[in-house]
Every structure is written in structure tokens, then in C-alpha cells.
Amino acid sequence: MLEILRRIVQEVNSAPDLRDALNLMARRVRDAMGTEVCSIYLLDDGGQRYVLMASEGLKSEAVGNVSMSLNEGLIGFVGAREEPLNLEDAFAHPKFLYLEETGEDPFHAFLGVPVIHHKKVLGVLVIQQRETRRFDQSEEAFLVTISAQLSAVVAHARATGGLAAIDSHAGAAPAFFDGLVGAGGAGIGQAVLLYPPADLNAVPDRIAEDANVEIAMLDRALIQARTEVRALAEQAGKTLGKEEQALFEVYIRMLDRHALAAEVVEKIREGNWVQGALRIVIDEHVRNFEMMEDPYLRERAADVRDLGRRVLAHLQTGERKQQDFPEACVLLGDEITTPMLMEVPRECIQGIATTRGSRNSHMAIVARAMGIPTVVGAHTLPLKQMDGREIIVDAFRGRIIANAGVELKHQFQQIIREEETLLEGLEKLRDLPAETQDGVRVPLMVNTGLMTDISRSIERGAEGVGLYRTEIPFMVRERFPSEEEQRVIYREQLLAFSPNSVTMRTLDVGGDKNLPYFPIEEENPFLGWRGIRMTLDHPEIFQVQIRAMLKASEGLDNLRIMLPMVTSVFEAEEAQHLIHRAWAEVRNEGIEVVMPPIGVMVEVPAVVYQTRAFAQRVDFLSIGTNDLTQYLLAVDRNNRQVAELYNSFHPAVLHAIMSVVEQAHDEGKEVSVCGEMAGDPASALMLLAMGVDALSMNATNLLKVKSAIRSVKITFLRKLLSEIMAMDNAEVITAYVDLQLEKAGLGYLLTHRRKVV
């Protein structure tokens, strides 16, 4: 059964559009279960009617034409109950609705299961049989399994098919694709698909301007690929037997102009460019091999895929290296690396959208630093069909919009202008203090990690660096940077912000931040070997980094060192011991530097309960609200299935922060916040009311937070804080804070409210 399920999923995943996906699904499920009918009903775009979208066994003319309302018939009954319905004789059920046009008269046995994705009923999957009988438990369990496994596939196929239909008629409804906010804002532009070289799956379909030119490119690539395979065959002849060597002859024949290539030429003649035509042909052959019963033949799918990649690599070698980008473009990709991003002129980029990745990926961090609206993890986004289309990146809500109507597009254009005007108006606050109207002042610092962050931060009036992510220089290299390479990088940061302090976090990798040359493979990386745990296990890496930091601070003395992912007092003490040892070594080399303050990040609940003990041993504490919220609520903030549960205004989070501030202050130690809460005007004001000593954020948000602080009195904030601390619902707290700040005239700063429905 698992093998059957695997094959069904493979086929449906490879379907080019919604109709093919559903027809495949109906056919394969009927055959797998040995029934006479399998039908799929999906809710229409308005979510008000179930439409028969595919069927094997009912009349073909009924497909696409037969529908029923939400509470009609057995289909509506299954959808409303959100449970399977197994009937010996469907005609005898009171909810049965006879539809003559379907031709279901002979079929009595009925089993229907809902297709549910992210709590939403998408449709109903049905099997029927002439014989009057109840389907047995194993059959029911299998259909439920099929439905559960394929619900995401149906959702994706539906999104893809819905988008494919956009061009077919004017005035179609906008298509929305949900993801996670990588960097806030909104942007409108022509979609440009970026994809890594020699990745067949990433190649989009494009119209061939000249079929003969495309075919000539194919011929050149085939010659190069055959030469390459012959060289491999010659090399293999020294170590492999005749049977294995014969495989290379098969490969060479497959690369003949009259074999696979003939099919590619046919697709080019139909209008596709050579790379898209190659992808289609290779995909078809791979699917055919993967469906074969014989394990040996099934394995040949990998060979075909490899040949396709080799030809593609030669095709792409001949492409122009310098791509022309539209004046206003939105970059799309499965994953867009930082080097790929840097190849595009900044002035052209209006937004970024990826189907994978997290908001903590290096690219997302870079995008936030550059102020580019970004949505990540939009896994239903049909990239190949989006290429060249005008789309909207709504990074306030975390979604991509295609086929936006005139009115919807106008609303986003207005929002973009408002954001630009707001930032221009806030520039006058650059040199003014972040001080409430009744005299309470708080330093506003920045989170950095890139050289580009320096100028943006200084332009916005940052009073220092509250978090310098030292892992970024490690992530962009192919090896660990040397002590001198690190010293140069750190010196530039310290010098740029001198005499203001720069808090450097020691190497924080693990979780979703891996080094390409030091991979950490774990089943549960967020609860694994990350942060201080890794560096204490590798003191040689830790010591080099600390020495580089200390040497970089010579003559400036504005360095502060912060330890990430600390969970026990012992870890802090061990790290302090190593830092003191490095300090002594540097001084013995004749470099006079003062011992920098050492602090810990509060991002694990264990530290919340031991704040007093930590405060007695370190010089400062900094709350990383991103991880603290994640661990307190047991919600992976990068998992869109539970993203709605991630809320920093959850009462547990607020009480934890308040507890840390109070205990640290009792020990005479300062507390800063360097997580996302610090950069949101609403939560920043609540942190100020709690008594947080400094706020550190992305440079993009600094002036907004400063404007909010300068617009209120601390008495108003403390009253609001006392009110929400008595509440027990995160959604209610969020709404109440927004309402009160709007009443106080700060609605224009609440960027998370800038959403178009």
C-alpha cells in the first residue's frame, strides 16, 4: 500500500496542471482500490459549492458541470461533518441527492472522505461500487490515508491550476499564495525567476523567439554531452567490468539526435525554449521509469535525470552571463542565495519571494538589511508559471498576489507611497533622542551582520550595535575565516560605531543556520547542537574568534561580547574562563585592550527561571524575543502550519520578559532586547514600559520606533501595560494595544496593520 501511495503522490506531483492532477488521482485511486468509481469534488473559488472536478466511472460530461451547495447531498454531508461516511446503500440515506446527469444509478456502495488542508475542507474524495456493501475498515483506512497524504498536493495543484487559468479569461479573481514574512513591506514588479545552474526542476517555460536558434543550441549541447560521456566511459573502462561499461553506450545512444533530442525538438517547434523543452521531455521519461514495476528499470530514472542535467549544464554555459532585469522586478526562486541576490541591481528589486527558506536565512537577513519586502516559504507558489508575470509581494501579511485587479493594485501602490512618505518624514528625527514626552529616554541600537548595515544604521541615527551577528562572515565563506580575517571585519564594525558600543554575539550556528563547510545534521536542530553548545565543544574555534574580537577593539574599547543559546550557569562560566584566557594571551602579545563586558542572551526558558543567578555572574543580559517566544510556546516560527500560534504578545512571553527585567535590575544589571519585538513600534513601547534599558532592531525600523517613543508619555504606557498584563489571550492583547495606540494617534506607525484584505 505504501508503494502504491508513493506512486500516486509522485504522479500527481508531476502533473502540469490542476485538471491533469485530479484526473490522475481519480484514475490511480480507483485502480488501487479495485472499485468501479472514484470521483473528486472540490469547493469552488467562493467556497459555496462542491463541483465535480474529476471522475473515473461517472459520465464524463458531468465533470465540471455538476455541482451542489454546501449542505446538499452526501458530498455536502461529508464536508460539513469533516469525517468519512461509509454507506452500504447510498440511496437509502436521507441526505442522498439523486443527480441523473452523473450516471450514478447503478452504484450503491458509497465511501466519501473529506480532503482537508490547514483546517480547511478543500473537497471530498469518493469511491462507489455497484454491489450493496459496506467498504471494510482497511479500505476506509486506505482512502483516509490517501486523502491525508494528498490534501497538500490538491492544495498545491489547485493553486497552480487556478493560476494557469488566469490568462484564459479577463477579470479572473486574484490568486493568493501564503508564506512567511521575511522582510516587511510591499512591492510590485515583473516576476523574474532565479534558479541554480543545471537544476532541471527549476527551469521555467518560456516562449522561444527563434526555434531554429534554440535547436542549434541543443545540437551544440548534445555534442558536448556526448564527448563528456565518452570521456567518462574511457575512464570507467579502467575499473569497471564490460556490463557496467555497456551502460555508457546506452547513455550515448540516448543523447543521439534521433532519440531524446527528437522529442525536445518537437517541444521547441511547439513554441517552448530549449531549456523548458528539455525539462518536459526528461520529466516525462523519469516519470515513466519511476512507475515501472521492475526495480532495475525504475532505477534508470536516475540515469535519465543525470543525462538531462548534463545537457542542461552545457546549454546554460552558452547563455549570456549578464541577464537584463526589468526596471521593477520581483525575484522568485525555490531558494535564492545571497550571491544570486547580489547579481541583481538593487534599484531594480521591488520584492523577493521564495518557496523554501525561513525568515532567518542569510538571504532574508540581507533582504531586511537592504529594505527589500520579502516573503519566504510560500510553498504553493507555482514558480514556473509566475515567471514574467506582474505580481505583488505583500510582506505585511506574508503572501504573493497574482492577477491583481486595478483596484487591488492601486491600494498597494498607495500603501507603498505612504511607507516611503512616512520614512521621508521621519528623517528629521535622526539626531533627536528616543525620549518620551515626560522625559524617559532609551538608547536605540541596531542589529547588524553585513557591511551594508553600517551606512544604513548610521544614516538612521543608531546609538550603537545591540547585536552583531558574527556568523554571517562565516556563512559567506567556504571555510572558517582566519583570526586575521575576522579581526579586519570586526575592526570595521567597531570603528564605524565608535565611541558607541558594539555587542558582538559569538558564533551562533545550528538550528536553521548552518555553515556549508561544517554541516550539522540533526532531527531536531532547534533543540540540538547550536550556539554556545557548539563553540564550547570546539574551543579552538571559540578562542580564535574571541582573540580576533579583542584585537579588533584595540584603542577603541567599545566591544561587548554576548553568548548565545546559554541554558546553564556552567556554560556562562566556562565561556567566561575561555574569554579571560584569550584576553591574557592577547595582552601577552603586547596588545593593550580592556576586558570587555560579557553578557548572555535570554532566549531559553531555563534562563528566565535563573535570571538572578546569571545576573550575578555576567555584566548584562539581552533578550532574544524570537527564540524565547519560540521555545516558550513550542512553536517553530519558520513553520507556516503553526505560524499563527507564534505571537510575542502571548501572556507567557510578556510575563517572562517582565520577570527577567525585574530580577536583573534587582542585581543592578541592565537588560536590552534585540529580537523582533524591539523593532515593532507597538511591542517596543510595551518593552519600554517594562523598564528595558535598550532596544536593538533592524535599521529600517529605527525611526518608526523613535517616532512612537517621542509621541507618548511613559505614564500612558505603564497604564496600558498594567491592563494587558491582566489579560490572558494573545489575540485580545494585540488588538487592544493596537486600538489604544491608534486612539493615541500612532496608527500610522503600526505597519502590521497595513494589510489589504
Image (tube, rainbow, N blue to C red):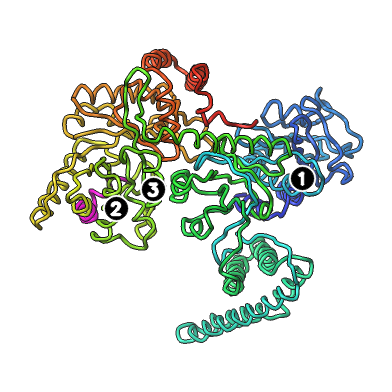
Q: Nearer the viewer, mark 2 or mark 1?
A: 2
Q: Was residue 150 drawn as part of the magenta stretch in this picture? A: no
Q: Taking the image as drawn, is residue 484 in sight? A: yes
User: Is there a contact, CB below 8 Å, between mark 2 and mark 1?
Assistant: no
Query: Tag 3's secondary structure?
Result: helix
Q: Quadrant of residue 296?
A: bottom right
Q: Front-most of 668 and 215?
A: 668
Q: Which residue is mark 3?
A: 455
How packed is label 3: few (under 14 Cα within 10 Å), some, or many (20 or more)?
A: few
List x then y, in percent, for residue 294.
63, 66
Type of the residue with mark 1: Thr
Magenta-highlighted residues? 531-547
Horizontal side, residue 613 vs residue 521: left or right = left
Q: Label 2, label 1: how many angstroms apart (C-alpha)?
A: 71 Å
Q: Earlier in the sequence, mark 3 or mark 1?
A: 1
Q: Which residue occupies 20% across, 47% down?
A: 556
Query: Tag 1's secondary structure?
Result: loop
Q: Which residue is mark 2?
A: 492
Q: Which residue occupies 87% across, 46% down?
A: 60
